[in-house]
C-alpha cells in the first residue's frame, strides 16, 4: 500500500456512526495502474484521511484491509460502495439509508480515537 504513488479522486460517500457523527470515505484510482484503487476515511478531526483498504477493479486480487478494518462489520458495505464508484456508478441509496448510507453501526475504526470511554 505504497502512499508515494499518485492517485486521482473518483468520489466519496459518508456513513453515519451514531450520535450524529459521520465518517467520509474517499475512493481513489492509481495513476500508474488503473486497476488499483484505494479507500481512505476522514473523521473530520483535523488529522486528514487514513488508509482503509486497497482493491482492484475489476476484482483480480483480494481486497487488502488495514488491520483495524479487517473483519469490521462496516467493511463489506464500504467495499460495495467503493467498487460502485470505481466502476463509475453511484451507489444506490434506499429510503432507510438517506444521504449517509445505512443506519449507524458500531465497531468502526479510523485512525486514532480522540476520546476514551471508561465505565
Image (tube, rainbow, N blue to C red):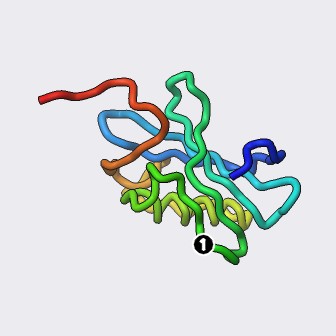
Which structural element holds mark 1? loop
Task: Name above or below for residue 61 compared with residue 45.
Answer: below
Task: Name above or below for residue 14 compared with residue 78.
Answer: above
- How many callouts does the rendering have? 1
- In the rendered image, residue 112, in percent from the top left (x then y), is placed at 45, 32
Find disc 1 in the rendering and name its residue: 62
Instruction: Classify residue 24 by image quadrant.
Output: top right
Residue at 86% over, 53% down = 31
| Few, some or many residues within 10 Å of mark 1 (<14, 14–19, 20+) | few
Task: Name above or below for residue 119 compared with residue 52.
Answer: above
Seen in the image, is 34 located left or right of residue 75?
A: right
Residue at 69% over, 49% down = 11
Residue at 59% over, 55% down = 53
Question: Closest to the observer: 79 or 81?
Answer: 79
Residue at 58% over, 62% down = 64
Question: Closest to the observer: 5 or 34?
Answer: 5
Question: Closest to the observer: 25 or 112?
Answer: 112
Seen in the image, is 104 located left or right of residue 13?
A: left
Seen in the image, is 75 located left or right of residue 40?
A: left
- In the rendered image, residue 87, in percent from the top left (x then y), is placed at 72, 67
- In the rendered image, residue 66, in percent from the top left (x then y), is placed at 53, 52
Instruction: Classify residue 38 by image quadrant.
Output: bottom right
- In the rendered image, residue 107, in percent from the top left (x then y), is placed at 33, 49
Amino acid at each position: 500500500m505504497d502512499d508515494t504513488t499518485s492517485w486521482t479522486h473518483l468520489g466519496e460517500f459518508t456513513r453515519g456512526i451514531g450520535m450524529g457523527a459521520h465518517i467520509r470515505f474517499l475512493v481513489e484510482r492509481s495513476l500508474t495502474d488503473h486497476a488499483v484503487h484505494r479507500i481512505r476515511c476522514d473523521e473530520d478531526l483535523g488529522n486528514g484521511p487514513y488508509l482503509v483498504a486497497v482493491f482492484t477493479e475489476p476484482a483480480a486480487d483480494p481486497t487488502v484491509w488495514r488491520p483495524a478494518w479487517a473483519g469490521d462489520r462496516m467493511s463489506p458495505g464500504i467495499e460495495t460502495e467503493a467498487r460502485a464508484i470505481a466502476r463509475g456508478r453511484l451507489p444506490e441509496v434506499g429510503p432507510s439509508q438517506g444521504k449517509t448510507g445505512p443506519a449507524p453501526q458500531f465497531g468502526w475504526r479510523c485512525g486514532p480515537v480522540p476520546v476514551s470511554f471508561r465505565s
